[in-house]
Image (spheres, rainbow, N blue to C red):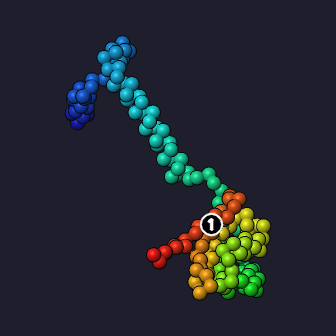
Amino acid sequence: MEYTLLWVKWNFFCSCSIINLPKKRWDMKKFYNEHRIFVILMGIAAVCLAIVIFLLLRYFYFGTSAPKRTCSDMSEGTKNEIISTMNADDLIKDTSMRVSDKSNVIFLTMEFNETASLDEARSKAVTAYELFSEDQRACLDFQFILIQSPSEANDGFTIMGSRNVRGTNFVWNNNNVKVSED
């Protein structure tokens, strides 16, 4: 008795659908001929939905295909050697270095005395970059902050520079603001 009740409910549900689906092959042709625009639009929507699902899965589930960079850890001796080499220069007051483990970035902050020019500071940053080994330069990004405090002899500067692993040049960003006293 329960089976017949379920069968009746199923038949009622199928007969009450918004669009009665055809039962035979010639009814499919009739349905297509009567609802041609609807069928074409649903086909386009299905293709677009499949493309969106594919791209979302590819991007979020499978991730990007860029290989992760793995670098050997930089020892404290290497850090101290590079810092002492840079501090031995007469144009540089102080040098500090921080290595980010998560993002493979070396942050170098160099403070210059008042006799250094901006071009000399940039060349010292390039010299500091060349102190690192070829393996470290091949897998680490570099971020430089060059600082010179203003004095009576000059205006001073604060400039940031960076070098990406895939890049061929240093990129410098001049943050100096010239204020005229008119």
Q: Residues within 10 Å of mark 1 (few under 14, many from 20)?
A: some
Q: Residue 96: where, in percent of width, then height? A: 65, 82
Q: Residue 4: where, in percent of width, then height? A: 23, 31
* Relative to 173, 127 lies left or right: right
Quadrant holding the C terminus: bottom left
Answer with the quarter of the image where residue 12 lies.
top left
* Relative to 23, 166 lies left or right: right
Q: Residue at x 66, y 85 (%)?
A: 113
Answer with the quarter of the image where residue 101 lies.
bottom right
Residue 69, visible in the rendered structure: no
Identify which residue, 12 or 181, lies in the foreground.
181
Q: Residue 161: where, in percent of width, then height? A: 63, 69
Asked if residue 43 is positioned above or below residue 176 in the image, the reply reads above
Identify which residue, 8 or 110, lies in the foreground.
110
Quadrant holding the N terminus: top left
| Most distant residue in the front direction | 182
Q: Residue 175: where, in percent of width, then height? A: 55, 71
Q: Residue at x 53, y 47 (%)?
A: 58
For the image, the number of numbered tags is: 1
Asked if residue 3 is positioned above or below residue 142 in the image, the reply reads above
Residue 36, visible in the rendered structure: yes
Q: Residue at x 67, y 64 (%)?
A: 170
Q: Name the residue beneath numbered marker 1.
A: 172
| Most distant residue in the top direction | 26
**Kind of residue sitting beneath label 1:** Trp
Answer with the quarter of the image where residue 174 lies.
bottom right
Q: Secondary structure at mark 1?
A: strand
